[in-house]
Image (cartoon, rainbow, N blue to C red):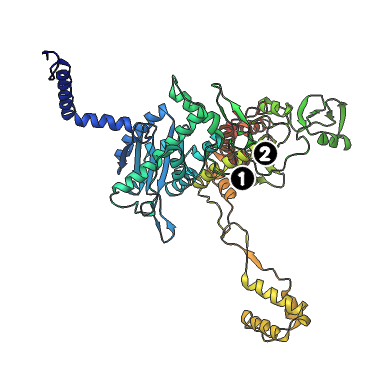
């Protein structure tokens, strides 16, 4: 056998052995780093892999962390949001822990039970309506923070809306996390109901709290990708803002109801094509509650002229004909109907305010343009407007109580429902600001039933009207009850029974108060006056609904301008100006 064919170590086997020994050496020396790399690769599908938890126990820590969170929000203006509290004897204690998580996985666990306050930096983040706070039923947590710490959390959004829009399964946070992220949340009641006010939170509590908020932001990203696949985007902040504007805006600060929106699986659900060709659920099928809509147009746009032919305003045709029928006006044109007064009117159309009343109005939803179905919307709700005072009832001098047509707009049923739900948020803010809580069961009625009088009336009516039909034994029981109710009475004659058959069984409720009345009273006494309350509601409507078809010259400052005109003409009581929040000098400047 030759040297070359003899079994033994060849150059190839020697090289392979050397490579193996070298590999073993590298693996042994750098095993820690290699294992970390492998773990990252294996966990690349874990949406919580970047989680960084920071527990905040004092104001200084809170301020520092809020600066980081705000920086993250400049890139991705969404935060996972959740709260924890302790319940003792069935009574909820103030929120103990607030959880906020950014898109980078920074989880801030703010121990409010330790801080006993909301630092200004945290308040700024919570009240920033450009930052979306997402979770499941976040409105409930927001309302608790408002009651406990006086902070009005802005722009909360329930993730179940996005789930429904994408045709994904809805449910609780744990259910959606399991279904869509493949992340199992530990919802053991021992952790959920643990002592969140404890001096130190244990590891299980910290992980539980951080994960709840972190899953919220990850679900948002998951659903956003379903609606509009991100792919390569030049600017992530613009992508997020588009998702918020296109899909979330109509449902910000609204409490989720499964009946409000249909899923993509519904046969009646329409879809729309995005620019990239993918389909998503239209919001056109938002299920509105049954709201009565107008059978006839609100605006018939007849013109009313002064006696010299100057245009005063547009009015309803029936109102225009009222002047004609009373012989104090005459028709000068048929199409459009124009009526000229036969007397000098008390005022003329002046400035932008006057032009507003001269301009014809369209019969369509001011938000979406719907022309088939619409109903009236009071921008300043009646529960407040009706409490605006009369300063001189004999002359019917009013503060912004007349000419309220400016604040009556047309909305379709869907937009009307959404607007009303947004209004709840501002009402809650006003309740806190004006110390005017919403009425409870014991305070929401002006009168209360007096049980003794109610029972007395019932017995007397039975004995007076039905005596012949009531068995003797039952009559004895009823008279015995009368003895208990009226121990001072010796004999229950027919005259006595008759005196109680129509007795009033209610009395004035000493605990009664009206939320709207208290709010109006608060603004009357404030320096800003009632015009600031009007302004607040008008700005709220514009901000939350973003109407595209508002009447021309509609103005947030409408009544300020109107009162200034009247003051210049000497047609207003100074008391009206004071209550409105204006002085005579300011109004005439």
**In the drawing, what numbered circle is on residue 413?**
2
Nearer the camera: disc 1 or disc 2: 2
- Which residue has dot 1 on it? 384
Position above or below: 562 against 459: above
Give the image location of residue 417, x and y in percent. Answer: 63, 40
x and y percentages locating residue 131 in the rendered image: 45, 33
Name the residue rendered at 59%, 49% in the picture. 517
Q: Secondary structure at mark 1?
A: helix
Is there any visible trace of residue 111 in the rendered image? no
Compare residues 473 and 491 and report the one nearer the observer. Answer: 473
- Give the quarter of the image for residue 25: top left
Kindly identify the residue that appears in the image at 22 percent across and 29 percent down. Answer: 33
The quadrant in which residue 65 appears is top left
Q: Is residue 138 left or right of residue 578?
A: left
Determine whether 586 is above or below 150 in the image.
Answer: above
In the displayed orientation, state which residue is furthest to the front.
1
Rendered-image quadrant of the N terminus: top left
In primary-sequence order, the first of circles 1 and 2 is 1
């Amino acid at each position: 056998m030759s040297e070359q064919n003899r079994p033994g170590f060849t150059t190839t086997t020697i090289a392979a052995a050397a490579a193996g020994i070298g590999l073993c050496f590298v693996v042994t020396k750098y095993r820690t780093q290699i294992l970390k790399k492998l773990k990252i690769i294996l966990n690349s599908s874990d949406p919580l892999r970047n989680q960084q938890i920071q527990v905040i126990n004092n104001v200084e820590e809170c301020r520092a962390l809020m600066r980081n969170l705000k920086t993250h929000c400049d890139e991705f203006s969404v935060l996972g949001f959740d709260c924890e509290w302790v319940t003792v004897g069935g009574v909820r204690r103030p929120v103990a822990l607030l959880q906020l998580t950014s898109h980078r996985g920074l989880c801030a666990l703010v121990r409010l039970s330790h801080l006993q306050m909301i630092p200004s930096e945290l308040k700024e983040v919570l009240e920033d309506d450009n930052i979306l706070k997402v979770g499941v039923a976040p409105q409930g947590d927001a309302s608790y923070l408002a009651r406990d710490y006086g902070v009005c959390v802005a722009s909360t959004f329930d993730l179940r809306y996005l789930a429904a829009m994408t045709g994904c399964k809805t449910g609780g946070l744990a259910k959606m996390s399991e279904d869509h992220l493949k992340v199992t949340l530990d919802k053991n009641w021992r952790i959920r109901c643990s002592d969140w006010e404890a001096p130190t939170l244990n590891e299980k509590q910290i992980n539980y709290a951080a994960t709840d908020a972190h899953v919220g932001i990850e679900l948002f990203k998951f659903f956003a990708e379903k609606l509009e696949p991100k792919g390569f985007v030049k600017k992530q902040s613009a992508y997020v803002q588009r998702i918020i504007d296109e899909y979330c805006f109509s449902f910000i600060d609204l409490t989720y109801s499964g009946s409000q929106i249909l899923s993509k699986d519904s046969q009646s659900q329409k879809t729309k094509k995005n620019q990239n060709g993918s389909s998503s659920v239209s919001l056109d099928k938002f299920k509105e509650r049954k709201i009565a809509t107008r059978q006839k147009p609100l605006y018939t746009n007849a013109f009313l002229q002064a006696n010299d032919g100057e245009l005063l305003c547009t009015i309803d045709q029936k109102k225009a004909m009222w002047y004609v029928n009373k012989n104090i006006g005459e028709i000068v044109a048929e199409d459009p109907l124009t009526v000229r007064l036969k007397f000098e009117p008390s005022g003329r159309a002046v400035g932008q305010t006057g032009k507003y009343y001269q301009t014809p109005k369209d019969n369509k939803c001011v938000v979406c343009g719907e022309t088939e179905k619409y109903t009236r919307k009071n921008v300043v709700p009646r529960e407040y407007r009706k409490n605006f005072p009369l300063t001189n009832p004999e002359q019917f001098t009013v503060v912004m109580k007349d000419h309220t047509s400016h604040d009556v707009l047309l909305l379709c049923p869907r937009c009307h429902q959404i607007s009303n739900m947004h209004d709840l948020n501002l009402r809650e803010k006003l309740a806190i600001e004006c110390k005017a809580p919403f009425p409870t069961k014991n305070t929401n009625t002006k009168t209360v039933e007096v049980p003794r009088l109610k029972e007395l009336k019932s017995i007397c009516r039975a004995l007076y009207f039905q005596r012949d039909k009531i068995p003797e034994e039952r009559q004895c029981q009823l008279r015995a009850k009368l003895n208990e109710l009226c121990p001072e009475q010796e004999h229950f004659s027919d005259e006595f029974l008759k005196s109680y058959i129509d007795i009033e069984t209610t009395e004035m409720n000493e605990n009664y108060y009206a939320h709207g009345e208290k709010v109006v009273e608060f603004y009357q006494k404030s320096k800003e006056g009632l015009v600031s309350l009007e302004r607040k509601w008008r700005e709220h409507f514009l901000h939350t609904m973003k109407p595209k078809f508002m009447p021309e010259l509609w103005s947030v400052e409408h009544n300020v301008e109107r009162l200034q005109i009247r003051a210049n003409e000497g047609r207003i009581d100074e008391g009206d100006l004071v209550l409105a929040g204006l002085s005579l000098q300011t109004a005439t400047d």
